[in-house]
Amino acid sequence: MRVVLGVGGGIAAYKSAELVRALQQRGHRVQVVMTNAAQQFVQPLTFAALTAQKVITGLFSQESPQDTLGSAVEHIAIAQENDLLAVAPATADLLAKFAHGLADDFLSTLYLAFTGPVLVAPAMNTAMWEHPATIANLNLLRERGVSIVEPDAGWLACGTMGAGRLPDPEQIAEAIDSMTAARRDLEGESILITAGPTQEPIDPVRYISNRSSGKMGYALASEAVRRGARVTLISGPVDLPVPRGVDLVRIRTAREMYDAVLAALEPATIIIKSAAVADYYVADVPKQKIKKTATRFSLDLEPTPDILAAVGERKGDRLLIGFAAETENMIAEARRKMVSKKCDMVVANLVNRDGLGFESDQNEVEILTRAGQIVHAGPAGKKEIAARILDQVARLRLALQAVEA
Ligand SMILES: Cc1cc2nc3c(=O)[nH]c(=O)nc-3n(C[C@H](O)[C@H](O)[C@H](O)COP(=O)(O)O)c2cc1C
C-alpha cells in the first residue's frame, strides 16, 4: 500500500522515522511530507535516506514539481497516487487546520485534496490536548471519518506527566494496517454508481438543472473502491475531485446519462443510482440564444427517459439501489419507488432541511430494504453515510447469496 506520512512540528517528530521503518517492514511504500515546523525538529535528509525518495517540504518547492510524478500540481498528484494519509505527530495546529479546512501549506492542502482514508496520531502537551479547541477539532475530524490514534499518558518532553505522548510507532503502524485491511466486503463486485445533477439545455447558453452536488455519489464511489469493488462512476457536471481507482464517465444530460448507464450495465453486479436526474427536458432546443421580450415566456418540456425504471426492467439478479430525495412523505415515496422501479433498496432523505442533503457535506438518511427493514443513518458526513449504505448493500448481497446456496 502507498502511504503518505505527514510529519508535524512536535517533539515527537523523531519518532516518525521509526514509524517509516515499521510501515516499510509491513510492506508499505512511504512518501514523507514535512511541515516547516517539523523541519525544525528533524532534517528531511533522515526521511529521504529511509525512504530513498524526495521528501516534500513545501507547497511551492522550486526544484521538485516535475521530479517525481510528472505533475506541477504536486499536492493533487500525491493525493491521487496514495492509498492512505497518516499524520504523526499531528500537532494541535494541524488538527485545527484540518478541522477548519485551512490549506496554507503542503500537508493541509494535501489533506483537503485527499479522498482516501486518513489517520491522525496527535501528540502534544496535556493542557493543549485537553483544551476545548483541540477537543472540538478532534470531534469534527472524527465525525468526518478521520481515524484517530489517541495519545498515551506518561512523562512528556515538557517535563510534565499526563496524556499527550505519541504512541509507540509499532502501535500506529498496527492501526494503519488494520485500516487498510479493513473490510474488503465488496471484493469481486462491479458497481455502477450515478452521481450529480444533469443539465438540460434550453438554448445554447442556458440550461435547467438542480442543486445536487454529487458529493453523496462520489463518497459512495470512493468507499466502494476502498472496500474492494470495481467502480464505474457516471457523473453529471460537478466540481469534485475524481475518487482514486474509479472509471469515470462524464455526461451532461439525462439522455446521455440514460445511454451511459445502459452501455455500462452488462458487467455490473450492483447499481446505485444516486444522481439527481432531471425529470423534464426541452426537446427542441433552439440553435440561437432566446431573446428577452416583455411578454410571458413558457418552455415546452418533455419527460426525460426513466433510467431507474429502464435498469429495473433489465436488472436480472443485479442489486438495484435507488435514491429518493423528497420534501414530504419520505418513507411512503421511498416504498412506492422500491416497488414501481424494482429496487432492492432505496435510500431516502429529506432535502428541504438546512445543512443536510443537497450541496451539504452532511446527510441523514433512511435505508429501506425490500424485506421491509428501515435503517437510520446520520446525521453524519457523507463519507460516513456512504459507509453505512454500503454496509447494508454488502449485508443484502450476503443474505441473497445465502438464500441461493
Ligand atoms: C520545542 C517545541 C516543542 C513543541 N512540541 C509540540 C508538540 O508536541 N505538539 C504540538 O501540537 N505542538 C508543539 N509545538 C508547537 C508547534 O511546533 C507549533 O504549534 C507549530 O506551529 C506547529 O506547526 P505544524 O502545524 O506545522 O505542525 C512545539 C513547539 C516547540 C518550540
Image: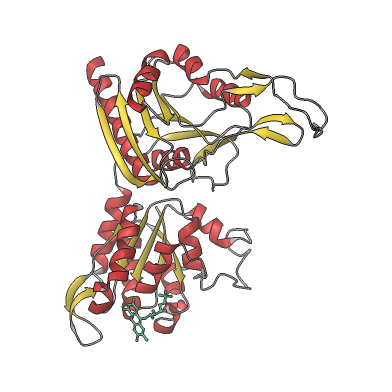
Identify which residue, 245 or 106, lies in the foreground. 106
- State left or right for residue 49 relative to residue 200: left
x, y (%) of residue 59? Answer: 56, 69
The colour mode here is: secondary structure
In the rendered image, is residue 284 in sight? yes
x, y (%) of residue 269? Answer: 41, 24
For the point 51% across and 58% down, which residue is it? Answer: 78
Q: Residue furthest bottom?
A: 159
| Residue 60 vertical position relative to residue 374 in the rendered view, above or below | below
Which quadrant holds the C terminus?
top left
| Residue 96 vertical position relative to residue 213 in the rendered view, above or below | below
For the point 39% across and 62% down, which residue is it? Answer: 99
Total marks in image: 0
| Residue 373 vertical position relative to residue 33 in the rendered view, above or below | above
For the point 32% across and 44% down, which residue is it? Answer: 379
x, y (%) of residue 62? Answer: 63, 73
- State left or right for residue 27 relative to residue 245: left
Quadrant of ligand 1: it is bottom left
Identify which residue, 11 or 377, lies in the foreground. 377
| Residue 123 vertical position relative to residue 175 in the rendered view, above or below | below
For the point 33% across and 50% down, which residue is it? Answer: 180
In the rendered image, is residue 405 in sight? no
x, y (%) of residue 207? Answer: 68, 33
Q: Quadrant of residue 199?
A: top right
